[in-house]
Amino acid sequence: MSEARILVVDDEKPLREFIGRNLSARGFQVFYAANGLEALAIFRGETLDLIIMDIMMPNMDGLEACRRIRQTSTMPIIMLTALGQESDKVLALDTGADDYLTKPFGVDELMARVRAVLRRTSWRTSSSNNQREILSYQDIELDFDAQLVTCRSKRLKLTRTEFDLLHYFMKHIGKALPHRNILQNVWGIDYGNESEYLRVYVGRLRRKIEKNPAEPEYLLTEYGIGYRFGK
């Protein structure tokens, strides 16, 4: 994890350097960009493990840059926002971000988010090297080793977080899973109260796997508890 290559994108130089300085001190290799256009240029020219990106920037904002990155990559993205409204956080997640941080934030919170995202990525890589795991339910098949999901014989394009969430659901078919359990098993032990994460990502999965997302057949809501995959 300490050798991860991280791109920090923010038009505020002091904050950009604050983040980069703390990442470098912990052994990460850091790249910098001041807006979305610069971020895309670095993304296309470098091999990166994580992008930490502000939303409000000139020339191209973080949301548009995130959308463009998501067209070709499932690389983890943490969005930075000065906007405290839940609707703004939901928009960042729905655009394709894996996580977000609300300004102002401290070093401990920053590093906890970074470690959680990179831990999920490294866990997936190390696990896939040691086992062959294929899960199936009705028209959906998930090949963990190949990082591949097919639904009704069509390959799905999932972000890493979407894949991890579906994988967790399919390992517990038919069980009512509480919100906190899902968050701590997919996002990490530091999570548990971020209900907006689940609303957004369950909605994203439903749009990709359900014939009618408004009347789901696979990913069902357990009111007052959480969610259940399958009957």
Image (tube, rainbow, N blue to C red):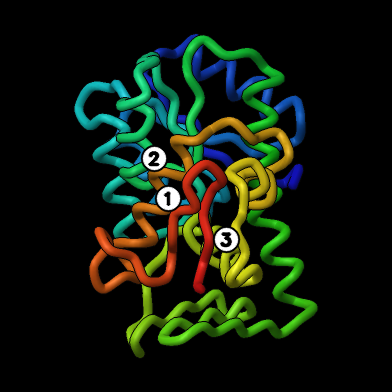
How packed is label 2: few (under 14 Cα within 10 Å), some, or many (20 or more)? many
Give the residue at x 50% y 13%. Answer: 15
| Residue indicated by mark 3 | 164
Q: Name the spot of residue 229 as percent of width and height, x first.
A: 51, 67
Q: What amino acid type should be assigned to the residue bearing mark 3?
A: Asp
From the viewer's side, name the closer residue of 162 and 146: 162
Q: What amino acid type should be assigned to the residue bearing mark 2?
A: Leu
From the viewer's side, name the closer residue of 146 and 65: 146
Q: Secondary structure at mark 2?
A: helix
Above or below: residue 158 compared with residue 111: below
Q: Secondary structure at mark 3?
A: helix
How packed is label 1: few (under 14 Cα within 10 Å), some, or many (20 or more)? many
Task: Tell me, yes or no, whether the two marked residues, 2 and 1, touch with CB atoms within 8 Å.
Answer: yes
Q: Quadrant of residue 129?
A: bottom right
Q: Residue furthest right?
A: 130
* 58 to the left or right of 153: left
2 vs 1, front mark: 1
Q: What amino acid type should be assigned to the residue bearing mark 1?
A: Tyr
Compute the Cα span from label 2 to label 1. 8 Å
Give the residue at x 40% y 13%. Answer: 12
| Residue indicated by mark 2 | 93
Above or below: residue 203 compared with residue 114: below
